[in-house]
Structures are given as structure tokens and as C-alpha cells.
Amino acid sequence: MTDAKPVLRLENIVKTFPGVRALDGVSFSVMPGEVHALMGENGAGKSTLMKVLGGIHQPDGGTIFMGDDAVVMSGPLEAKAKGIVFIHQELSLAEELSVAENIYLGELPTKSLGRVDWTRLADQTNAILQKLNVGFDANTRVGDLSIANQQMVEIARALTVDAKAVIFDEPTASLTDSEKVVLFDVIADLQATNVGIIYISHRMEEIFKITDRITVLRDGQYQGTVETADSTEESVTQMMIGRTLDLSRNASHHALGEVALEVRGLSCSKHYQDVSFEVRRGEVVGFYGLVGAGRTEIAETLFGLRDPSAGQILLDGEEVRINSPADAIARGISLVPEDRKGQGLVLGMNCRDNMTLPQIDTLKAGPFVAQGAEMEIFDKYHKQLDIRTPGWKQQVGNLSGGNQQKIVIGKWLSMHPKVLIVDEPTRGIDVGSKSEIHKLLRALAAQGYAVMVISSEMPEVLHVSDRIVAMYSGRVMRTFTSEDVTEDNLIQAISGMTSEQVA
Amino acid sequence: MADITRQQIGSLLAKQGILIAFVAFLIGFTIANPKFLTPDNVLSVIRSSAILGVMALGVTFVVISGNLDLSVGSMMSFSTIVVLDLHDKIGPALAIPAMFAMTLALGALIGFLVGYLKLNSLIVTLGMLSAIHGLTLTYSGGKNMDIADKEGTWFSVFGQGTALGLPIPILMFVAVAALLGLILSRTSFGRKVYAVGGNGTAATFSGIPRARTVFMCYLISATCVATAGLIQASRSLGSQNTVGQGLELEVLAAVILGGASLLGGSGTIFKTVIGVLILGFIQNGLLLIGLQFYVQFIVTWVIIILAVWLDIAAKRGKLMSPIA
């Protein structure tokens, strides 16, 4: 690797925004055929760095080299022309168009009079799709594809230009395990063609599986680049957050209280059937399963967003009907939803107003909102949850994912719920905030809250839960206690294998 | 350091761009015609903006909640015709509450369709624009409406009276603005309007009754329309069926000029008042510098586009951008 020239080299990149030094002298290089991980907590400067690379932001200092030449990325088109290709976390495809049209959007092959040459388009596209070894063809409508396959379309689009560097930004965020395997194969193929790859992810297993080197940023500063083979999760985490993390299992040591929530034979037409479980005060019950196993739908039913078709919900032993979220909230059920930005927060609103939203009607001073009471609530959870924000007036859209999630959690804690349901508590959140949120969930249970945690990440479920309900295709397969759970039998349960089959 | 200053100016422009533009307009017109900034002219501008202004205050709620109301112009015609007709039939003391009730019923219908049935507000209110026009014409039989005894009625006080040395329409505009400003910025209902417009799903997930909130916004809008109709009827004491025609776009322009986002979730009553005044002063200024009345329609449009563009450009930090 020493004799080859890097395809891309950043030297001393500086970028400031009002009041923030987002990038402070960042340097690193990507070799041809290398998969180079870029890691850092949210807010560490990864996105800003990528925007500089993509020509969306202009750096205030430093130089970008491609090969031997210093280059200036004046805009996204320029970056693309120079062979820098982004595969974004959020897909940017036209769903109503075909795969071929998406791949060659803006550069459709034409015949005379500007007519599209459909035959040539399909041939070119199918040639690329064949390389990617995917199960769909050029004429498939993109909207009919799974998220994973849509991502393949993005990658196919990257392959149409003469890519020198391909940047993957959290590519596996919405992929299943088998889809990930395909993605990693594609990345390996790209590697073989001497393209340099920058791989941004929070997921340690992936980083250690596919990358060659790791560059870490913290608070906009370059922390160093290490060979993946010489590193461990602990050492990289320490570089990212400046301290070590405790990832050990975490069963409760306090006594459990009464049953706060009991569900008996609950069904919701297509989504889940005959689900029964109970959650005690002081207990965290994890719900683990594949996407589509019905876990989120159960949470939505308990929160009054869906009507059950059969079964009972009991709160403190009394049967209840929950007709709306307002109803659920009044009965002491709170939901930290799966989609933080879409369902959890009003992004354009400030931190305080988001936090007090569910109880805004009760914070009254005469006809007006009691601003003093609002500030008290904000101050309390700002401190208790260690939310990093310049102040209550800050729009939540400007906070990092971890701090946004803390606002949502603070919002519900301030309601003092009986049952706190948390759906995917750490999705898209950096590793430091992740462990803080895990600790917080444990602490809440210790304080006597009944907590339901829905998660698709096994380490998370294992880490925070006292008991784990394993679901498969709308049914509860098995309930584990922290004593009898192992990774193997958990995986078997959520893949639909019953314990008899296993035995 | 120079960089920070530039960014500070940028952020000042982004936040107060409309206000700065407004002051610039005032200075420009005053230089062009010294009569522009005299107390008499200022009062006359505000008075003639009062009707549009009151309507814009109500529409501000609708826009912040993430919806549109294009029916306010024809609804105002309806209120005006109804109150004039009832004035002679049941007397002004009963005519006014009756007219408010009928206008509010229309607002409730729109609020039900948009809020509870979740129909697209553009379609609903565009349809209502012509439906209410039809209703007005049916009610009046197509004839102009006049009060028989124009000299002898106290009804003229809302449009022509003065108190504290100020015209009543101005006082009503100020009072409604103050009241709605307090409701929007200080009450829990106001907070819900911002939440519903900013992210309706998140509002639902916080237990906010989205449908009822939207419904209430249309009721507020209808109340403002009825108030505007009252001022209009009282000022002229007679009216055509089309008195409010086209006002819906001017109202929307004032709200947008003030800086409320058509996507919902942002805007304030104060900003809408500024938007109303900008529109009023521009139209007046154009007349004073001697432009034909008809030209102002074109110039008004150009200025609105300019204002909105500068506003967005200040937020983006550049004049043109490939992404929004």
C-alpha cells in the first residue's frame, strides 16, 4: 500500500459555522482499493466533512487532493465529474420511474430528435445490474423495490460514472442481515476495481468486518487513523468518545413491583395475533424480532393509534379501552416512537416547547401557558438527561440525534407515565449517546417505571432487558428471562423456530 | 472576524429581512414624495388596510396550521351582503350576531372538511370560494344590497366612526391583532397550532387533537372574515355581491410577505401585521408617485415575489440554490 498513491487526500480541512468550528484541521487519505471507515459521534463533523467533499460546503482552509492534483469542489456536479460518488443514507430516487431511468436520470441515451433509446438504456442498465447480481431488471419500477434493492439502484448509479471514490453513508441502516451480505459483496467488488471507499457507520461489527483502516473524528478534530486489524471495539470507542464504555449485561438488582401493564390475547387483524405479556413496575421488557414482526404495531395499539381486533389490555389490573393517544397519555402510557423526526418531534419548534407539548393544556397561568412551569420542566430534564443544547430556544432540528432522542424521552418522563414504551431507542444515534440512553432506561426501571423496549439490535435488547419477548411474524414465540436467554436461542425464536424444533 | 460579521448580517437579514425591506420602502417612497410619511397619509393607509388586515390575521392561524384559506374573499362578500340585508329586516343589533353565526357556520363547514375529513385545504377552500359566491348571489338574487336609511343608523360606526381620535376600523384591527397575537403566542391553543402545522404526525403522537385544532383555526378565520365584513358593510352601507373578490390572494400575500411559511409551523401575528402594512404602503406609495391605479396590481405582484425570494435567499445564504 505504501507505493500506491491515495485516490483522495484531505489536508488540514477547516470549516467554521457561526459559533462552531465544525472541522478543525482534518486530514486523511483513501488508498485505491481500500475501505476506509470514518467514525465519530453525531456532531463530530462527519457530515460536514462529506459535504465539503461533495462540494456542498466550501472549506475555510485546507486542501483536497485527488491523485497529485489539488482540487476545488465548487458544487455537487463538479464532485461527481471528478469521480466522487455518494451513496446516501436517505435515498434520492424517483419512485415512479424505472430502475433504468433512475440510474441514467439526466443522461438518458437518445436517438434522433431527442427520443429516448429505450433498447440501449435497458441493455446498459442490465449490464450493470448483472455485475451487482441483483434480482430485478432495468424496467422494474423503483417504488416496487425493497429499501435494500433501492440502495442497489443507487450503487448501480454510482457505477455508471468513472468513480474514483465512493462514499457510503450509513448504508446498512435499513437493511436486513441477508441484504447486508449482498451489500458487502458489492463493496468487495468495488474494492477489486481499485476504487477508494469511505464507509461511514456506527455499527462496530460492520466496521471490523469490512474496513481496512479507521479514521476517527471527535468534536471536529482529527483523532487519528488506525489499521482496523490492530484495533478493538474498545480502542476505537475510546478514540470516539474519549473514555471507555461498559457494554456488559445489565439485569436488574432491584425488586420488581406490581404488574403495571398486562396484555391478553391481543390481536390486530393482519399485524399480530394472540399476543400476551405483562410488564411489572421496575422492569424492562425487551421486544425483539425482525422488521415486520408486529412489535411497533403492538406499541401503536397500546398508545391508541390502532384498534385491536381482539383481546384485552389491563392497566394496574383493570381492563381499559384506549381510543386515542390523548387517552393513552391520560392513562399513563407514553410512547417514544420509532421515527424520531417524523413522529417524535416538531423539528422547527424549540427544545422547551417540544418537551412540554403533551401537557401544554395543564400548564396554565390564567388563560395563558405558564412559562415559568414550562421552564422548570425543561430545566429539570435538561439537567437530568444531560441534554446538550445551547439553550431552550434552540430548534430541535439543530440538535444531534442523541440529544433529540433525549428531548423525546424528557417529554414523556415529564408526564410521569406508568408505562413507558420506547421503540428503537437508539436508532441512528452515536455510540456515546447510545450507552447513555441504555443507562437511562435502566435507571428509569430502577425508579419504578414499567418500561417496554422495542429494538432490532440484539446487543441492545440483551443489554437493557430483564425479560425479552421474542416475536416472529405477528406472534410471540417465546419469552426469555435474563437467565435463560442466549444469542442462539434468541435468533432461533425470532426466525420462527419453536423451542421443540430446536430441541 | 470579517467572516463572522458577514454571517451575522446574513442571519439578521434572514430573521428581520421583511422588516428591513419595509423600512427601505418607507424611506424610498418618502424621498420620492414627501407627502408619503405624513400622519394623515399613514392613518389613511392603515385605515384602508384594516379590512384586509383583519382577514389576514385569521388566515395566519390557518397557514401556521399548515393549510390554506382561499375562500375568505368570497366569504367576506357573503358577510357584507347578509349583514346589510338583515340590517333593514331585523335591525342592526340582531343583524350583526346573525351574520357572525352564518359566517361561522361556513367556517365550521370548511374546518370539518379539512380538519376531520382531512381533505386537501387548497381544493376545499378553492371550491368554497365559488360555492360561497353562488350562495351570496342566491341570497341577494344578484342585486346590490343597500341600507334604506343611511343617515339614521348607528351601524355606520364600525366603518366610519372614530374613538380616541382614531378611526374605528384601525382600532378594531389593532384590537383583533392584539387578541389573536396573545392567543397565538401565549396560549396552549396557539402552541398546538404551531405543533400541528410544524409536524402533524408528531403532534398526534403527543396527544394533540389535530383535527380539532385545524377546525378551530378555520373558525378563527371565519370570525375575522365576519369582522372584516362588518367593517366593510358599515363603511359603505351598501355593497355589490363581489366586494371581497380577489381579496383572498392579497390576504395570502400579506401573510406570506410577513414571513409565514406556506408549509406551516411558522409565522406570527406581528409579522402578518407588518406584511399587511407593507402591502398597504406599497400600493399607496405607487399612487402617490403618480402610477396608474392598474399598474399597482403588477407591481404588487413583483414586490411579493421579490420579498419571498429575498427571504428564502437569506435563509439559504445564497441567491440561487439547486436544492431548497
Image: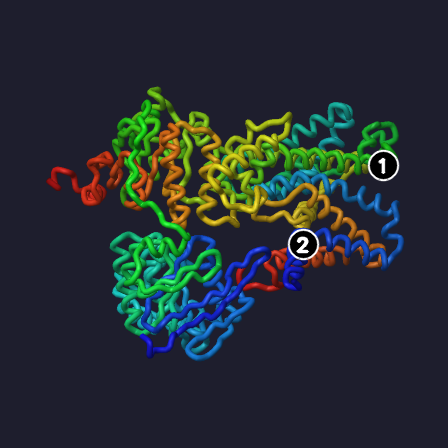
A108 lies left or right of B216: left
* A321 shown above or below A404: above
Q: Are discs 1 and 2 located on one and the same chain?
A: yes
Position of residue A427 measured from the top left corner of the image (x, y, whole percent): 38, 47
Which residue lies most toward the front here?
A: A243
Q: Amino acid at mark 1?
A: Leu
Position of residue A100 measured from the top left corner of the image (x, y, whole percent): 36, 66
For label 1, count other residues whose C-alpha is less than 10 Å away and answer few (under 14), some (14-19) or many (20+).
few
B11 lies left or right of B147: left
The chain holding disc 1 is B
Q: What residue do we see at 84% from left, 46% from top?
A: B42
Q: Secondary structure at mark 2?
A: helix
Name the residue tied to disc 1: B166
For label 2, count other residues whose C-alpha is less than 10 Å away and answer few (under 14), some (14-19) or many (20+).
some
Name the residue tied to disc 2: B12
Q: What residue do we see at 33% from left, 79% from top?
A: A3
Q: In the rendered image, which quarter contains the C terminus of chain A? A: top left
